[in-house]
Image: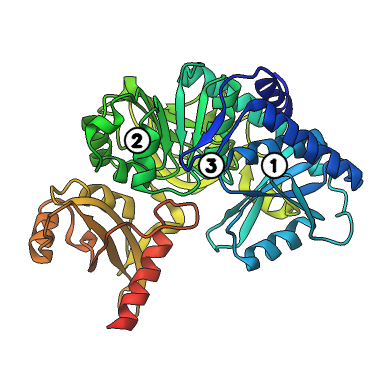
């Protein structure tokens, strides 16, 4: 098993199919090899130092993969940053990394005056991926070449993608889900179709040839609105990044006979730590399944192992996890306990060895002293015949501490009667769990990754309150 650079280099050297995007861009492997060599030479001409972070502007273009390879072949570390990122974001990440250079295609721009400090943590690093924490402050997750390459081998055995596959990837390559899907596709010699910007129309164009598609559930809510003929060639669906509600999973199965792999994992743990595969369905929907190869987990409640049936924090030990947080050893130390990464997710073990998520510890709503997991309400609401998607969050309230706000997306042509909906809920959950406020939306509020975002529900509530 080589480094990511060696794996990608061999994939391009083997030739094979062009890398495409749904907007018509297309690059042959030999063209990307030439671009990578140009990037490598330009960095070396500027006396790049070993393991130095370099920003790479990502737009889900085929050329982005050549730029990544060029950075890795110059022995530098890639810091993916979207081409449309706000100037404030660019400046904040430049201060965090100390990067001197930014790559966009084969263009190199100077963005810093001098080489950053030497960081031993970056010695075997391939990537620094910035994720937003619960405070919204970005954390630089350092991903190692060998560790991510090892995870790709695990996913290869799990998913059995071969060179005949055509993989549609609407996921941004600034995040680990999109990156591993793209890299695994190329390593296997399959055809990769990228999507610079997600839309239902772009998804339909990409599906014309696709045999596999990867995306977060928010994307698949749009997919199931298309005609079933548009996905007639699909044999494989990869989803993750947010909870796949059982109701949506069943809709996806009705839409397409493709095998669904619902994958759970974090950037910090190398992604894809648990999987609900075709053999686990349909009864497995609503859980995160069983651990993938070499992953060990435990559930911890109040500092002790959770007993059977108890909810505890999910903690994960894996050889494929991050090397550390950039320049933040204190956060790194606080994030682990005895080699286990503390995910912050609350979960319960099931009798068959699987794991069911209850919610995020930080998302738990405290309403009048009652602790409520919003995920439970989400899943219940999406079981209503007139609701396509739902997302609940706590919003501060002087009397109760927090109240429950629910963003709901009605099914096409459905009319939501709030009173009838409350009666429907009261027959299924305790009264204190029924949302206090409903917000009808065309789509769930989302964050910068395109995933449904509970914090955005609170922002939506605040905006609508101001307008009233």
Q: Name the residue under label 1.
A: 127
Q: Mark 3 points at which residue?
A: 266
Residue 1 horizontal side relative to residue 396, left or right: right
Image vertical order of residue 292 relative to residue 75, above or below: above
Please report the residue visible at 72 percent of the width from the left and 29 percent of the height from the top: 33
Depth check: give the residue in front, 230 or 464. Answer: 230
Residue 356 horizontal side relative to residue 424, left or right: right
Q: Where is residue 368 in the image (x, y as percent from the top left)?
A: 30, 70
Numbered label attached to residue 287: 2
Q: Position of residue 158 (x, y in %)?
A: 48, 20
Quadrant assignment for the N terminus: top right
Q: Is the residue marked by circle 2 packed among few (<14), some (14-19), or many (20+) residues within 10 Å?
A: many
Nearer-N-terminus badge (3/1) = 1
Mark pair 3, 1: CA separation: 15 Å
Q: Where is residue 261 in the image (x, y as percent from the top left)?
A: 39, 28
Depth check: give the residue in front, 283 or 49. Answer: 49
For the residues bearing labels 2 and 3, Cβ distance under 8 angstroms: no
Of circles 1 and 2, which is in front?
Answer: 1
Mark pair 1, 2: CA separation: 30 Å
Which element is circle 2 on?
A: loop
């Amino acid at each position: 098993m080589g480094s990511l650079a060696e794996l990608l280099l061999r994939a391009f050297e083997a030739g094979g199919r062009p890398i495409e995007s749904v907007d018509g861009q297309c690059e042959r492997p030999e063209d990307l090899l030439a671009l990578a060599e140009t990037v490598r030479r330009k960095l070396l001409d500027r006396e790049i130092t070993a393991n130095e972070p370099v920003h790479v502007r990502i737009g889900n273009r085929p050329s982005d993969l050549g730029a990544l390879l060029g950075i890795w072949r110059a022995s530098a570390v890639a810091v993916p940053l979207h081409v449309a990122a706000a100037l404030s974001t660019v400046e904040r990440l430049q201060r965090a990394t100390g990067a001197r250079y930014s790559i966009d295609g084969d263009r190199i721009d100077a963005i810093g005056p001098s080489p950053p400090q030497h960081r031993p943590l970056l010695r075997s690093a391939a990537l620094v991926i910035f994720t937003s924490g619960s405070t919204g402050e970005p954390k630089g997750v350092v991903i190692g070449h060998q560790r991510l390459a090892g995870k790709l081998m695990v996913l290869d055995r799990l998913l059995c993608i071969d060179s005949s596959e055509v993989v549609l990837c609407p996921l941004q390559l600034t995040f680990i889900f999109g990156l591993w899907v793209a890299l695994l596709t190329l390593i296997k010699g399959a055809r990769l179709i990228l999507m610079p910007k997600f839309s239902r129309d772009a998804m339909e164009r990409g599906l014309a040839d696709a045999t596999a598609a990867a995306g977060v559930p928010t994307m698949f809510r749009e997919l199931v609105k298309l005609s079933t003929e548009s996905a007639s060639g699909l044999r494989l669906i990869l989803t993750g990044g947010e909870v796949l509600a059982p109701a949506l999973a069943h809709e996806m199965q009705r839409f397409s006979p493709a095998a669904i792999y619902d994958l759970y994992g974090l950037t910090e743990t190398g992604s894809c730590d648990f999987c609900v595969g075709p053999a686990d369905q349909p009864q497995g929907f609503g859980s995160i399944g069983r651990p993938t190869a070499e992953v060990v987990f435990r559930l911890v409640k109040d500092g002790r192992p959770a007993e059977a049936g108890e909810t505890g924090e999910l903690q994960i030990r894996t050889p494929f996890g991050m090397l550390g947080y950039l320049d933040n050893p204190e956060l790194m130390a606080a994030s682990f306990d005895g080699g286990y990464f503390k995910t912050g997710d609350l979960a319960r073990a099931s009798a068959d060895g699987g794991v069911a998520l209850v919610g995020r510890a930080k998302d738990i709503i405290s309403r009048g002293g009652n602790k409520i997991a919003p995920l439970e309400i989400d899943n219940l609401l999406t079981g209503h015949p007139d609701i396509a998607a739902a997302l609940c969050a706590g919003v501060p309230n002087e009397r109760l501490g927090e109240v429950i706000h629910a963003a709901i997306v009605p099914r096409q042509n459905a009319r939501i009667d709030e009173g009838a909906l409350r009666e429907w809920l009261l027959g299924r959950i305790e009264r204190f769990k029924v949302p206090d406020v409903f917000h009808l939306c065309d789509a769930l509020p989302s964050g910068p990754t395109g995933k449904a975002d509970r914090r955005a529900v609170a922002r939506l509530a605040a905006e609508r309150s101001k307008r009233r």
